[in-house]
Image (cartoon, grey):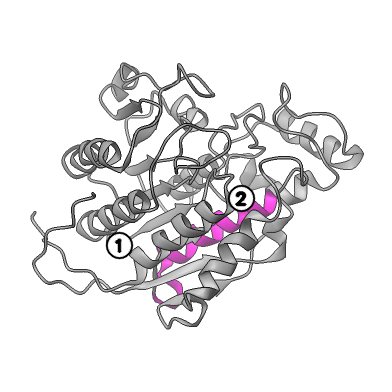
């Protein structure tokens, strides 16, 4: 059973933006592929059932299309050109076999990036009172600067990190990843970046793609100690997650002290996912979101951007992602210990 947050009674109710629209549903690889276009609608149905679409603490925004120039802040030009060409002919694969090309893949991927950037902009500028954000189809953490990988075409997280730095002058960023798969596209592209604080709880790479994320990988050069990889065994439960996440919380609170938190909250770590072997319930996502919500208000004026990431059991993603949004909008009680 997950422990509850300790509390000194402090009202943290704030506005949260949620990105939703058919443009985000374009990012999918067909009915037979785990990353299908219906994923966003599974979330949206649960979201509406909980009446969150009627909450006065939630702002619903349409997706936005990223300009190619901003995608170039992370990805290289040759790779972007490859995706554009694949988008026209719509056949073959963008990697070794996990990520198919389809007609319109460039536009669909650009909408994912643009929506994450819109979420970031609203959080930074506090547009409409927004302090927190959620993009359900964001969090494409496997793609590298020059390649697709693991269902991920453009890495919206990497672009958002670059945009936060270059457009808004944010230096210290904490990236927390609770997807079952290691966030290799962020880890290795920022491995030597001393101001990108990376914390990732994932199924041990000996048992699951991409096979990376050893606890010995803690950053290179001046970035040594700014990266925290926590591989956990197959069949791990909520209790195992809580134990691991307590290390993440200490890392964020004592070492990162960020100006912005980005959460990749992939739901493929929940029991019943068809391609992973972890056994969490959605309580794990609620626990992580509550913790990071509190830390965001402690360190970075409430600024947190959450991204859906993976998850291939539709009921699981609906439950986990809805719990994350509810954790951001509810009035919480917590202890503020500086």
How packed mark 1 is, by other alpha carbons closer than 10 Å (few <14, some 14-19, many 20 or more), is: many
| Residues drawn in magenta | 110-129
Residue 204 position, x and y percent, is 41, 23
Give the label on residue 57, or none: none
- Depicted 130 relative to depicted 230: above or below: below
Residue 338, position as x, y percentages in the image: 8, 54
Is-magenta flag for residue 124? yes
Q: Is residue 137 visible?
A: no
> Is 267 or 200 nearer to us in this picture?
267
Q: Where is residue 253 in the image (x, y as percent from the top left)?
A: 19, 45
Residue shown at 55% from the left, 61% from the top: 118
The residue that appears at 33% across and 38% down in the rendered structure is 237
- The CA distance from mark 2 to mark 1 is 22 Å
Mark 2 or mark 1: whose residue is earlier in sequence: 2
**Circle number at residue 113:** 2
- Image-based side of 256 in relation to 210, left or right: left
Mark 1 element type: loop
Q: Main secondary structure of the magenta part?
A: helix
Secondary structure found at label 2: helix
The residue identified by callout 1 is: 302
Image quarter for residue 243?
Answer: top left
């Amino acid at each position: 059973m997950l422990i509850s947050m300790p509390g000194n009674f402090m009202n943290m109710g704030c506005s949260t933006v949620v990105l939703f629209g058919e443009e985000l549903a374009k990012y999918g690889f067909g009915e037979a592929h785990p990353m299908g276009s219906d994923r966003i609608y599974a979330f949206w149905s649960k979201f509406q059932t909980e009446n969150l679409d009627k909450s006065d603490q939630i702002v619903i925004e349409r997706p936005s299309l990223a300009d190619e120039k901003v995608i170039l802040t992370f990805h290289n030009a040759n790779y972007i050109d490859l995706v554009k060409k694949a988008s026209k002919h719509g056949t073959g694969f963008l990697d070794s076999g996990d990520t198919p090309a389809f007609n319109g893949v460039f536009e669909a991927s650009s909408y994912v990036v643009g929506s994450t950037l819109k979420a970031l902009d609203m959080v930074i500028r506090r547009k409409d009172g927004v302090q927190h954000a959620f993009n359900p189809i964001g969090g494409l953490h496997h793609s590298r600067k020059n390649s697709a990988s693991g269902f991920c075409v453009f890495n919206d997280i990497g672009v958002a990190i670059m945009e936060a730095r270059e457009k808004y002058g944010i230096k210290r960023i904490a990236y927390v990843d609770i997807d079952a798969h290691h966030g290799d596209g962020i880890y290795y592209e920022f491995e030597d970046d001393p101001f990108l604080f990376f914390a990732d709880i994932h199924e041990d790479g000996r048992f699951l793609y991409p096979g990376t994320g050893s606890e010995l990988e803690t950053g290179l050069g001046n970035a040594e100690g700014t990266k925290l990889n926590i591989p956990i065994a197959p069949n791990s439960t909520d209790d195992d997650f809580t134990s691991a996440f307590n290390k993440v919380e200490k890392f964020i609170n004592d070492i990162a002290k960020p100006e912005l938190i980005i959460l990749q909250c992939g739901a493929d770590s929940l029991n019943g996912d068809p391609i992973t072997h972890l056994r969490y319930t959605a309580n794990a996502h609620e626990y992580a979101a509550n913790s990071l919500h509190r830390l965001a208000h402690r360190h970075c004026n409430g600024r947190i951007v959450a991204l859906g990431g993976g998850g291939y059991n539709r009921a699981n993603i609906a439950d986990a992602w809805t719990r994350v949004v509810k954790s951001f909008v509810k009035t919480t009680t917590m202890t503020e210990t500086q």
